[in-house]
Image (cartoon, grey):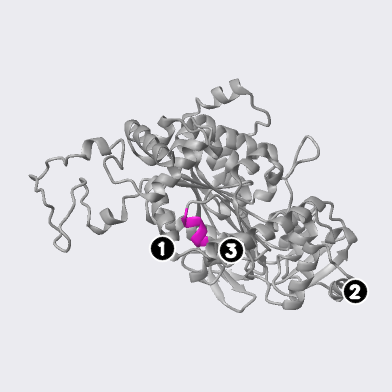
Amino acid sequence: MTQDQAFLILKTGANVFLTGEAGAGKTHVVNRYADYLRSRGISHAVTASTGIAATYIHGRTIHSWSGIGTNRDIDDEGFRRLAKNRPAVRRIRETRVLVIDEISMLDARTLSLVERMCRHVRGTTIPFGGLQVVLVGDFFQLPPVSREGKARFAFESSAWDALDPVVCYLHEQHRQEDPEFLEVLSAIRRDEFRETHLALLHGRLLGPDDVPDEDLPVLFSHNTDVDGINAAALSRLPGKARVFLMASRGAEKPLAALIRGCLSPERLELREGASVMFTKNNPEEGYVNGTLGMVIGFDQAKKFPVVRTREGDTVTVEPTEWVIEEGEDIVARIRQIPLKLSWAMTIHKSQGTSLDAAVMDLSRVFEYGQGYVALSRVRTLRGLSLVGLSDRAFLTHPAVRERDRSFREASAAAELSYGSREEEEILKDEESFLIICGVRDKREQSGEIGENGTRLRRGSGVARKKKSPGEPGRYDVIRKKYPHAYMPWKEGEDKWLRTLHNGGADVGSISKMLGRQPGSIRSRIEKLGSEND
């Protein structure tokens, strides 16, 4: 499925699982959809399973957003206590669209707790309380971590089954530029890794007398010695060290999560000659998250580091911001130079980055998907240098491989289904979803229907019924609570009403979701019921 097709499906309000191989453009589609929602004033939450992933998307962790925190088991009384968390309750009630990024690292139990919390707060039996839910990620990447032992994947949860998302499996490739290398990565995913693929990787192994390029980052499977390697390499450089301290502001908990997830450290020490990696996207300035370079000096006026990238561009790197947003509000903000020392990093912290080149030690990988994540960070086979390799680097989880086949089949079916529909039909679904989200009818936006519900003369822009300046319209007061009161019912709304009612939602919940009065909901249910008799 293409990015455009996935975007089209998202706009209809369908629950979606957005997936694809590393570099397929999942984050691009999410950002595009978030911009679409923002432009229409639709309240949405972009969250992630980990703090590091959350910083990439200007969001917060799903644990923080939902209010469940680090809880692993919550009974009925526990949910009642959590419902006293006013900020979390407000977030859940006001949100219309929930995005959860890096879903592969969220275990089944946590997803089920989030789903139940949404239902509890929104007072309905509909999955996730009737939110549109967009799950984003690739299960071939790093799996969920569990302190209790074996963790279950999110797709194994009852919440996933209840949500029954449309699968959008992106097939375009925007990171890997080398067809031969792309075939190696695809073979690992399909469990079809053969001697020919191994031979290609063996060709990238450094010999005992080979010296790795000192400017390249080295990826390790374990955290041991990563900080030590970077500190030791920096200390060997001549010249005066410059220290840049992070500035921060915001609510305590989201601020702590933002700092913890940011790849740039709170205290960044640099010297001329330091090997660095950019930690944020800023194409206008000539860098993206993962761009490599070397500090070649410091700006005389502002004292900021000057970096020469591996492409030969020179960038004066000024401080930038990372934020956590809630709707239109920013609840936490940090400001730092978007760099980190890059002589060494863990595979875990490399997830989400795109590297031009890297040195990797894959001799001690211990987790399914760890080798695949590391290899898929680089764009070409030429940019890969290996100092160690093991058979475990090519292993993927058997449960993931099995489920991936069904994901691909479901995506192909969705592509065929949506592709066969008339454009007008899809536009109706999009318009219905906008109405449910509280966005005004397109006719009202275009001026055919005035803000107070009066119909305008076509082409004139003058209402049939004039009113004095400052005089409230006939429906203004009631529409403060029920935005779509006394508006004509549409086919798309009827479709949603049937779905919600048949799913067990009560009249009060449906009233809030559709923005109509409870009496109107009851009457419509009776009318639709009589039409079916």
Which residue in the rendered view is the most extreme toward the bottom? 312
Residue 33: % across, % down: 48, 58
Q: Residue at x 9, y 45 (%)?
A: 467
Q: Residue at x 69, y 54 (%)?
A: 349
- Neighbours of disc 2 within 10 Å: few (<14), some (14-19), many (20+): few
Question: In the rendering, which numbered label is found on residue 207?
Answer: 2
Nearer the observer: mark 2 or 3; the answer is 3
* Helix, strand or loop under label 3: helix
Q: Which residues are magenta?
A: 7-12
Q: Quadrant of residue 188?
A: bottom right
Q: Nearer the viewer, residue 283 or 245?
A: 283
Position of residue 306 relative to residue 15, above or below, is below
Q: Which residue does the numbered mark 1 point to in the structure image?
A: 424
The answer to which image quadrant residue 513 occupies is top left
Q: Residue 224 magenta-drawn?
A: no
Q: Quadrant of the N terminus?
A: bottom right
Inspect this view and state whether residue 329 appears: no
